[in-house]
Amino acid sequence: MNHIKIADTTLSEAKSNLTFKQKLEIARKLERLGVDAIELPEIGTSKADTLLARTASSFVKDSVLSVAATSSVAAVERAADALATASHPRIRIELPMTSSIMEYTLHKKQDKMCDYVRTMVSKAKSLCSDVEFTAVDATRAEKEFLRQAVSAAVDAGADKVTICDDAAVMLPDDFADFIIEITEGVDVPVGVMCNNKNGVSTAAAILAVKRGAACVKTSIGGEATPLREFGSLVKDIRENYGITSDIRSTELMRTIDQIEWIISGKAQHSAAREIIDDGIRLELNDTVDTVRENVEKLGYDLSDEDINKVYAEFRRIARKKNVGIKELDAIVASAALQVPETYTIENYVINSGNRISSSAQISLNREGRTVQGIAIGDGPIDAAFHAIEQIIGRRFELDDFSIQTVTQEKEAMGNALVRLRVGGRIYSGTGLSTDIIGASVRAYINAVNKIVYEED
């Protein structure tokens, strides 16, 4: 049997709208799914970068936790420090192999690059027992130079080498031949990273595996080989081709649906799988165990903390109407995996009509203290958003706003999505209510709480 390792790059790619807690939840789900390595980006000077790696180290016990280092020896030292308590730490030396990128990002010419490879890899090896050298944009590099760089990395102590087709310039069979040509004589495991922009990365990766590659880099919603496709392919072909992995294939689709939902900020996975109304109607007197049982039927695997949040939101809705399975799915999307609430809604009064200006009076609770805002706007929702901003004491750029009904009956719940842009980052919030204004207010507060949490 050819046992292939899978290193997931989802968290190493930029996900500006993810909160700290969401990143940790993704890491937890990836480990539970059985990926061999969870990759994180380079540790910058922000304390949040180090905190993410250190916190992930506290619960990622089976998978390798891999941190990148590219920019300097100091980046290697920061990676080693962040991984100090990890059960299986790895420092990933990711370096460009094409002249234009070398000069632009590292200000180095080709004749100095091999020395830099040796310096970075040897420094990483002195601080961590597991070091990977990743040849970025390898398929556009000069072959002889690429061989020299790979050889330099191995000589300096790299335990594994990854060859990347970042620009997706090779067809699958050519890429597999390229891997053999470049790594001939290399006596450490070789991995591959294939960009999926042309839709053939899964084919390229599996052909490379047939030619001897030991690891494939995947992602969920990113540029690398899709984990959903590659994991399914390995499951389907394992009997005929003897290729296996540690991915728990029975949990693959459900877990990826959950991670895609976290990344998107709303339950987009519902479009990929139809939620069938089974006729069950949960009532206000139903217990938390009953709600948990139905949440698990939907495919969610939530912590006790998130189940309690879902139950509290369920009871708020159930006071007005019985809750069906589709509505429960929307409740999970709005209540679970959220940051601690800095602001909570106490009450709101909205006035609107065709002969008066729309106005909103909103009372929020912050740390036990009631704060109130009153504003006029171009419509009731605009007025409500202005009142919230008056309370917070700052304005936000509204990047997106939408409302949709969860079900079609007379008392259908409204599901609102708000995306706020702050400093180039997007923060998404969702809200549920039997009226669209209430749903919109809750979505806005949800997004604001994420902003405040991240800034604190």
Image: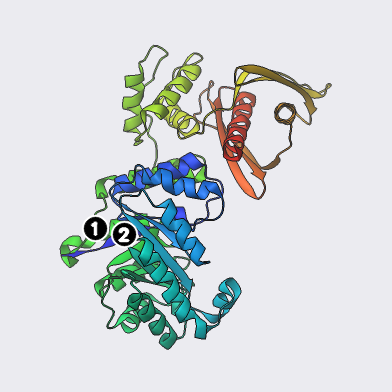
Q: Residue at x 52, y 30 (%)?
A: 340
SS under mark 2: strand
Q: Residue at x 32, y 31 (%)?
A: 296
Residue 223 seen in the current view = no
Q: Position of residue 401 (x, y in %)?
A: 64, 39
What's the residue type where badge 2 is placed? Ile
Residue 217 against residue 112 in the figure, above or below: above
Using a 10 Å C-alpha cutoff, classify the residue at mark 1 as few (fewer than 14 neighbours), some (14 to 19) or many (20 or more). many
Using a 10 Å C-alpha cutoff, classify the residue at mark 2 as few (fewer than 14 neighbours), some (14 to 19) or many (20 or more). many
Residue 391 against residue 426 in the figure, above or below: above
**The quadrant where residue 104 appears:** bottom right
Q: Position of residue 184 (x, y in %)?
A: 29, 83
Q: Residue at x 51, y 79 (%)?
A: 98
Residue 180 against residue 380 in the figure, above or below: below
Answer with left or right where residue 148 lies relative to residue 426. Answer: left
SS under mark 1: loop
Residue matched to label 2: 6
**Could you say which disc has been placed on residue 245 in the image?**
1
